[in-house]
Amino acid sequence: MSFTSANNLTPPHLNLPRRQELPEGAHYGNLPRLWVRTQAGPAIGFGHLRRSLTLASLLQGEVSPLFLISPGDVWTAESATERGWDSARFDRPTLSGRNKPHCVLIDTREVSGLLEFIQEMREQGIPVVSIHDLGLNPLPSDIAIDGSIAPEFEGFPRSGTCFVGGLKYLVLDPAFEELHRRQKSPSPEVRRVVVNLGGGDSSEYFHKVLESFRRCGRPIEVIGVPGFTSWGQQNLAEMHWKPVRFRWAETGESIADLLGQADLAVTAGGLSAFETLCAGVPLAALAYDSHQQKTIETIARRGACVNLGPGGNLDPGRAALVFALMQRDLHLRAALSQRGKRLVDGGGARRVCGIIRRQWTGAPAARAECKVS
């Protein structure tokens, strides 16, 4: 696998839904317009973009997406372009003609300019749906969705906002809902481990995790998910980790497929952790920041993962003891697998699409899913 490009936008191993053919007789010009405001990059992460692409892809044939992009965000721009979708500068969208949206979807950690933008949408009678994590960056949207394990709606400024929260609305690739349905029993012996530490520069954490497994002294296969940016993955693969056999995920190997064959996984505390839970793979998770730490602490309290703590503080010697315990304790791995699958069923994207769809069909939100402030 080559890592020569620093802007490896949506490599096949991400398993994001690709553009599908429109139904016969349909074309984007006569479909409801969906504006999507999202962002991606090493600083902000790639989870927001992944969720937005998943939702837009699931609505394929029902909407005409237009992605609103910040200057310099090549990840979002090229992801939209390769799917045949339109894009425009966030600060220069046109509200007239076929560009006028029937609904706006917002999923980004960067809120600059959004309050004025949402106010303009409200004045035009255009519904706004926003997606949040842990109650961060509250917005005065019509519908606020927090699919995190600890949803929080305190501080949201608009009275009358419909709040939808909980892991039932966690947006994952639909492949994980299918994977969740499969029966998965822990193998008596750990032979294959998947390590997925996010889309940015994870060199330090990969070194620590691989060194930890090397110290365990077991001849296991470890497969790394390389992420979106180039930070020296090839150099890491060429290092000697014996008795561990380490390789990067190949083109065509989706994360869902990798987890479907894994006995254990080590992830960061973002979407990759919940993909692992949904797949029923025993999980050990580390955190990049305080938000991820809150997430994995909450998962660990539910008995569904082993909390490795902040990645910067990870000690390979201590982590090796944890990994060795997980490898030899079949009952622990079975319990982690069962609890993870109970937490995350993988159907969140389908449910969120239903909420978005109702914004242009005029159907009301179900009382069971909407708590109005």
Image (spheres, rainbow, N blue to C red):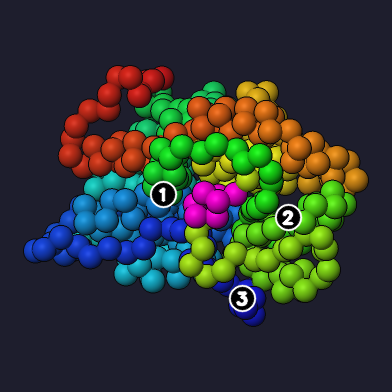
Q: Which amino acid does label 1 sit on?
A: Ala
Q: In this view, does 7 lie above or below 200?
A: below
| Residue at far right of view | 317
The answer to the question of whether label 2 and label 3 lie on touching residues, with beta carbons closer than 8 A, is no
Q: Mark 1 points at which residue?
A: 175
- Number of numbered discs on residues: 3
The image quadrant of residue 224 is bottom right
- Indicate left or right for 362 with 326 as reference: left
Residue 166: tell me if it is visible.
yes
Query: What residue is drawn where x is 16% and y is 64%?
Result: 27
Q: How far apart are marks 2 and 3 (CA)?
A: 21 Å
- Indicate left or right for 48 with 231 as reference: left
Which circle marks residue 209 in the picture?
Answer: none
Query: What residue is drawn where x is 90% and y is 45%?
Result: 317
Q: Name the residue under label 2.
A: 220
Q: How far apart are marks 3 and 1 (CA)?
A: 24 Å
- Indicate left or right for 40 with 80 as reference: right
Which circle marks residue 1 in the picture?
Answer: 3
For the residue labelled by badge 2, is the local secondary structure a helix, a strand or a loop? loop
Residue 138 position within the rendered picture, expressed as x and y whole percent measured from the top left: 52, 34
Q: Range of the magenta residues?
A: 256-262
- Indicate left or right for 118 with 4 as reference: left
The answer to the question of whether label 1 and label 2 lie on touching residues, with beta carbons closer than 8 A, is no
Residue 311 position within the rendered picture, expressed as x and y whole percent measured from the top left: 78, 46
Q: Which amino acid does label 3 sit on?
A: Met
Nearer mark to the viewer, of 1 and 2: 2
| Residue at far front of view | 188
Q: Is residue 78 above or below residue 110?
A: below
